[in-house]
Amino acid sequence: MNEKISDETYKKIKMYALSQMAKLKNASHNDAHVVRVKNNALKIVRILNVENEIDENLLKIISLLHDFTYTVRKPSVYTYVFEGHIERRIIREVLEKFDLSEETKMVIIGAVFHHTHSFPFGRLNKKRDAYTRILQDADTLDFFDCLRIKMYMRQNSKGIFGNIRNRLSSKLIEYGIDNLEKFLNYPVLAKSFFTDSSKKCI
């Protein structure tokens, strides 16, 4: 891709994205989550030594926009299953607000559309572009972030089935940590992110 995203354009999109995500009450999908995903994505670029192949401003934009589905829909089974389709429609509208080439828009739309369902389903994007693969892995790795785990457990502990739900979630998270390389486009990242410490948060 020839176009490079300017710092000014990145800052405009960042401000807009975070202002929208900050309105969300869901611990798993909010402004803190997309910032952690952005930081994960930048760390992945360093680990893979692909700084010269990636436009970091574009990667940061993709990371900040990847969960915009939740700005228009509450978490539900439907939202979870069709997140990519909802996301693609929303992001297309959002990107019209900014001065971006059609090629850049398509890279962003493709990445956010394909970022879902790596864990626990193992639906990866190994044949897609680097932006899509990095975003998906950055998002998957945040699933095992200690802060996110604690917030998720606290948020889901309420109600009659809260304890049962959290016990099942703990087992699923533990399985994911133990088998992390199966859910990443770049399996080497499983050792680089030291997620074993996340077990202490379950």
Image (tube, grey):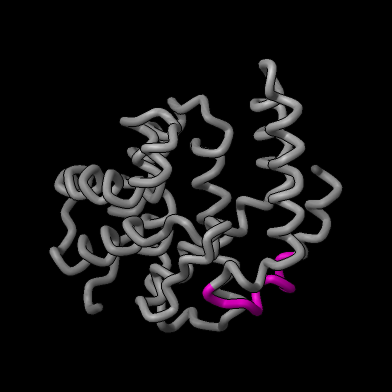
Identify the image quadrant of residue 16: top left
Horizontal placement of 135 versus 93: left or right? right
Q: Nearer the viewer, residue 2 or 118?
A: 118
- On the image, the x and y values in percent for residue 71 come to 35, 32
- Please tell me whether residue 152 is drawn above or below residue 13 in the rendered image: above
- On the image, the x and y values in percent for residue 34 come to 49, 46
Examine the rendering and report whether any part of residue 110 can be seen.
yes
Q: Nearer the viewer, residue 37 or 55?
A: 37
- On the image, the x and y values in percent for residue 32 come to 56, 39
- On the image, the x and y values in percent for residue 94 come to 22, 43
Identify the image quadrant of residue 48: bottom right
Looking at the image, the residue that sits furthest to the top is 159
Q: Report the span colored magenta.
A: 185-193
- Please tell me whether residue 76 is drawn above or below residue 185 in the rendered image: above
Identify the image quadrant of residue 170: top right
| 188 part of magenta stretch | yes
Horizontal placement of 38 versus 71: left or right? right
Examine the rendering and report whether any part of residue 41 can be seen.
no
